[in-house]
Amino acid sequence: MYQQRRNRILRATPAIRSMVAETILTPNDFIVPLFIDEGENIETEIASMPDYYRRSIDLTIKEVKELWNLGIKSVLLFIKCKDELKDNTGKEAWNKDGLMQRSIKAIKDAVPEMYVMTDVALDPYSSYGHDGIVENGEIVNDPTVEALVKMSISHAKAGADMVAPSDMMDGRIFAIREGLEKEGYTKTGIMAYSAKYASCFYGPFRDALDSAPGFGDKKTYQMDYANRTEAIREGQMDVEEGADIVMVKPGLPYLDILREVKNAVNVPVSVYNISGEYAMIKAAAKMGWINEEKAILETLTSFKRAGADLIATYFAKDAARLLS
């Protein structure tokens, strides 16, 4: 009696494994989050994110040039706002001479081909550390959306290719699209954080930007991690409102959500491999419990296998080098 099917034949050598691989990871898949600070020649390692840095604009430009040379095509910008500029309106977010606006212009001048995405949310600018305007202890939706529209238009004016609203306010994608259209920014894209969950894995990111909420939590606007169909609904609504790309965040604990959203929408889907996921791999590798390089590639491949067209990750630079 012989075996009719021997599946191991297609696993026998590196050559055949690469020939029949179902999922291919390349630097084109990556979006690199960059943290930007005021000053010159400043590079500050983020304690809870080993080997990741917050940089001044001049050093950020050097980093962007290096990323481009590695074949990475997109960056996602976040800024650290000075405490004295924070308030409950978020008005620094649309200051034409603000750190974000200057960063966009500097990067586009230095590397015009780099596709620049920008974070759109009020938490870095809020004296309360929340993603929206606070009234009587409540994060109010519609006034926040008005602020987000101003912020998005200011990023478009500065030269951003795509704005990325990460706030989870209702109706903000439609309002931002309408605002951009009215101002003539018909080529500016929107990557909507459509399924952004209230997660414990954001901690290191909040260290990076000093943006932890000053009271309560973000559960009245970020999603309950127990919910699945809600993510599908959010993604579909954002597409209807004008999103060009929808995002699932976090990544690793939400691979099922990523696949569900991918199956439900007809636009590209991105995933955010967030700071807590990065920190866990770094910590385990430091202890010698896992091989860091293998863990990076396995993790990023899992996102693409689950349905991600794009992956925002702090491992992008390392992964691009490994893939080369």
Image (cartoon, grey):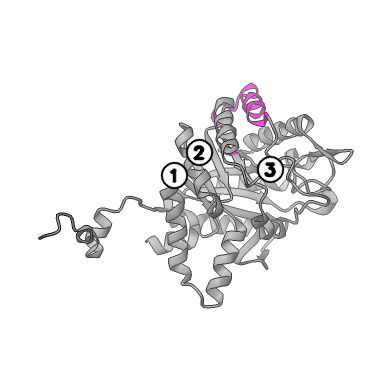
Please tell me the numbered disc located at residue 307: 1
Quadrant in which residue 5 is drawn: bottom left
Q: Mark 2 packing: few (<14 Cα in 10 Å), some, or many (20+)?
A: many
Task: Identify residue for label 3.
Answer: 222
- Tag 1: residue type? Gly
Q: How far apart are marks 3 and 2 (CA)?
A: 17 Å
Please identify the quadrant where the N terminus is shown.
Answer: bottom left
| Quarter of the view holding residue 266 | top left
Residue 112 is at least partly visible in this image: no
Q: Earlier in the sequence, mark 2 or mark 1?
A: 2
Circles 2 and 1, Cβ within 8 Å, touching? The answer is yes
Q: Which residue lies furthest to the right in this view?
A: 136
Q: What stretch is highlighted in magenta?
A: 171-193
Q: Say which residue appears at 39% left-offset and 53% top-offset.
A: 25
Is residue 258 rendered magenta in the image? no
Label 2 sits on what residue type?
Val
Residue 270's disc number: none
* Image coordinates for residue 287, horizontal then vertical, percent: 56, 77
**Quick one: SS at disc 2?**
helix
Residue pointed to by mark 2 = 261
**Relative to the observer, which residue lies in front, 176 or 265?**
265
Graded by Cα atoms within 10 Å as few (under 14), some (14 to 19) or many (20 or more), the crowding at tag 1 reads many
Amino acid at pointer 3: Gln
Q: Residue at x 62, y 27 (%)?
A: 177
What secondary structure is found at the residue carrying circle 1? loop
User: Could you tell me how far apart the alpha carbons at marks 3 and 1 are, in whole angstroms?
Assistant: 22 Å
- CB atoms at circles 3 and 1 under 8 Å apart? no
Q: In the image, what residue occupies the spot 63% across and 63% down?
A: 53
Which sits in the foreground, 256 or 48?
256
Q: Where is residue 12 in the image (x, y as percent from the top left)?
A: 22, 64
State the CA–CA distance, disc 2 to disc 1.
Answer: 8 Å
